Image (cartoon, rainbow, N blue to C red):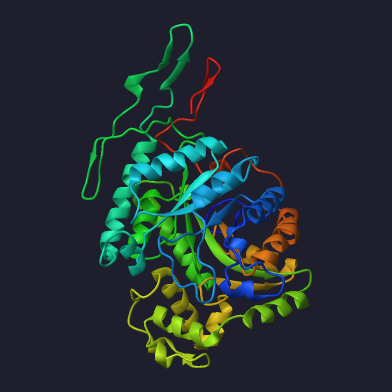
Amino acid sequence: MPERSAGGSGQFHLNLSLWTPGQLRTSWRLPGRDPLAYLDVENYRRLVRIVQEARVDAVLLGDSPSLGSVAGSPPQGLDPPMLFANLAAGTAGIGFVATSSSTYNHPYNLARRYLSFDHLTGGRGAVNVVTSFAPDAAANFGLEQPPAKEERYRRANEFLEVVTRLWDAWDADAVIADRASGRWGDPAKVHAIDYHGEFFDVRGPLSIPPSPQGRPVIVQAGGSEGGLGLAGRFADAVFTVAQTKDRAVSFRNEIRRRAASAGRHPDSVKISLGVVVITDETDSKARGREQELYETIPIEAAAAMLGRQLGIDPGKVGPDVVIDPADLPPGPTGAGPEGFQISTRALLAAAPLTARQLIYRSAGGGGHRLVVGAPEQIADDLEAWFLAGAADGFTVMPADTAADFENFARYVVPILQCRGLFHDDYPGPTLRENYGLPWPGQVARPALTNGARHA
């Protein structure tokens, strides 16, 4: 089995994004693509069956509490927890990572929703907790403008404090289920949390006992100082972006340091590096599809958007204008996600690139690294980054979900399994076990007593 540096096992985890039509949002323009596939539950069911057969750890779906522009591509679409409740039925092993905003949710409702999902799936649920900065999202919830970043992360920390307390409010042995005495549960082992903070006052507890995996898995995706602190305290897995190995290794080391500072073992949090993939049976086929996908991008508009995200006057950023690090503001701006800006700055520090080159290298300008080639080449790339200590696993985002999703699962995953980099079967029935995460310290593993499952 391969060795790897900077701690961790010789195998990595794999997630596949269900975002449709793909990470390259204009891929719906290709011949044979369904422009409404992002609403088609049968399409999602087919994709889940494909990755379950490959023993991929989990599927992930992003979300936003605002519409955004529909001028050139479909919006985010269906509510992830609702969709996943449908897709999980009849499956086993595979996990489901749904995105929800801490900025525009209440912790009690979210804690109940995801704990319910975890029971329905036998412990295969995860919540990807994000904060929301878009002005349109604020307007949807009656606010004139979104909360400032520092406030959003104060709220997110308090939000997850409440959520985790609610998930831990039942002792593992609170359910007695003794038919002879008629005692179903022990009220002394079900606790109100009586939380009173800056943003929330929550008595608790929930009406549901602990999760089959102790707690639902918490995923976090912010790359700012606030995001790093939140990850160190609460995250089981961190979804991140990096265009260079040095940046990825540095980020992983920093998250491990933050976890240790919060009193946690560094191995208790896994780094899941986002990678956009275009793959096909041969390199020439993959490269041909890459060019077809590039031709769907409205390059002038994409260049202007890139400029806004980097804090540059969009009127000065044409497709073939070279962007030099000296052109950028001194630090990340509020115009785009900070993790994207930091990653892009690291890439530009290696060599100035045109806006077109940046957009193509991140499959449309989303910031994540693009990998193109035959299955062996994709496997080689992931192996090299993993062994360098850049990540504990990967969240693979198909550039064109209609093609790259199945190509990755059918062709790349078996190569990784043959190399001993990825498991041949699910290590356990829960997502926590499949990620190689420790059981939460607050809740003991559920036991069987009197024929009843204490979970």
Which picture quadrant has residue 308? bottom left
Give how far across and how far down residue 248 sits, in percent. 50, 67
Residue sitting at x 42%, y 73%: 342
Q: Is residue 61 visible?
A: yes
Residue sitting at x 55%, y 42%: 124
Left or right of residue 451: residue 340: left
The answer to whether residue 284 is above or below residue 168 is: below
Left or right of residue 117: residue 32: right
Q: Is residue 134 visible?
A: no
The answer to whether residue 22 is above or below residue 329 is: above
Furthest toward the top, the residue is 180
Left or right of residue 407: residue 29: left
Total count of labels? 0
Give how far across and how far down residue 424 sits, in percent. 71, 47
Give how far across and how far down residue 125 sits, in percent. 52, 44
Residue sitting at x 62%, y 62%: 37
Give how far across and how far down residue 110 sits, in percent. 39, 45
Left or right of residue 74: residue 67: left
Residue closest to the eye, 158 or 428: 158
Residue closest to the eye, 2 or 24: 24
The answer to whether residue 39 is above or below residue 449 is: below
Residue closest to the eye, 300 or 128: 300
The answer to whether residue 350 is above or below residue 213 is: below
Residue sitting at x 39%, y 73%: 336
Which picture quadrant has residue 245? bottom right
